[in-house]
Amino acid sequence: MKLFLRILFISLFTSLSYGLYYKSIVDFLIGEKIIGFTVLIGTIVFLPLFLYEQWKGKRLQDYTLTEENLKKMRKKQELILKKEHKSLSEKHN
């Protein structure tokens, strides 16, 4: 799947580059169509496949703001502040 995504990305990038070249040098309207088709394929095909590949095997709960995650974040922030306060007080002594 990763190989397919890489090949698809390279082909989309190449198609976009070719569309920009074709638009500026050869024919404006056909270049616009090439660019539009490339963006459409990138959005409808590449993006969902890429997101599926990246999210595979991960828990959504780890990336959402639940009350439990907020408590963990506050606890970590308090520990960081305590360490900073402790190190600052040691420097002044």
Image (spheres, rainbow, N blue to C red):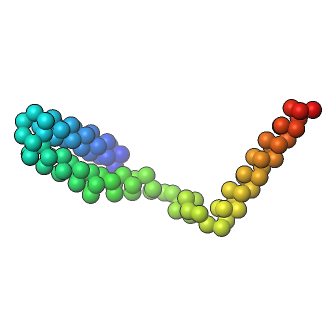
- Residue drawn where x is 77% and y is 52% of the image: 78
The quarter holding residue 63 reads: bottom right
Please say whether residue 12 is visible from this viewpoint: yes
Q: Is residue 88 left or right of residue 54?
A: right
Q: How many discs mark residues in the rendered view?
A: 0
Judged from this view, the residue extending furthest toward the bottom is 67
**Above-or-below relation of 12 to 58:** above
Q: Is residue 86 left or right of residue 25?
A: right
- Residue drawn where x is 43% and y is 52% of the image: 54
Residues 49 and 92: in front is 92
Judged from this view, the residue extending furthest toward the right is 93
- Residue drawn where x is 86% and y is 32% of the image: 91
Residues 32 and 2: in front is 32
**Above-or-below relation of 27 to 50:** above
- Residue drawn where x is 52% and y is 62% of the image: 60
> Residue 75 location in percent, x, y?
74, 56
Q: Is residue 47 left or right of residue 31?
A: right
Please say whether residue 11 is visible from this viewpoint: no
Q: Is residue 46 left or right of residue 19?
A: right
In the rendered image, the quadrant that contains the C terminus is top right
> Residue 15 location in percent, x, y?
19, 41
> Residue 74 location in percent, x, y?
71, 57
> Residue 37 location in percent, x, y?
17, 51
Judged from this view, the residue extending furthest toward the left is 27
**Above-or-below relation of 31 to 72:** above
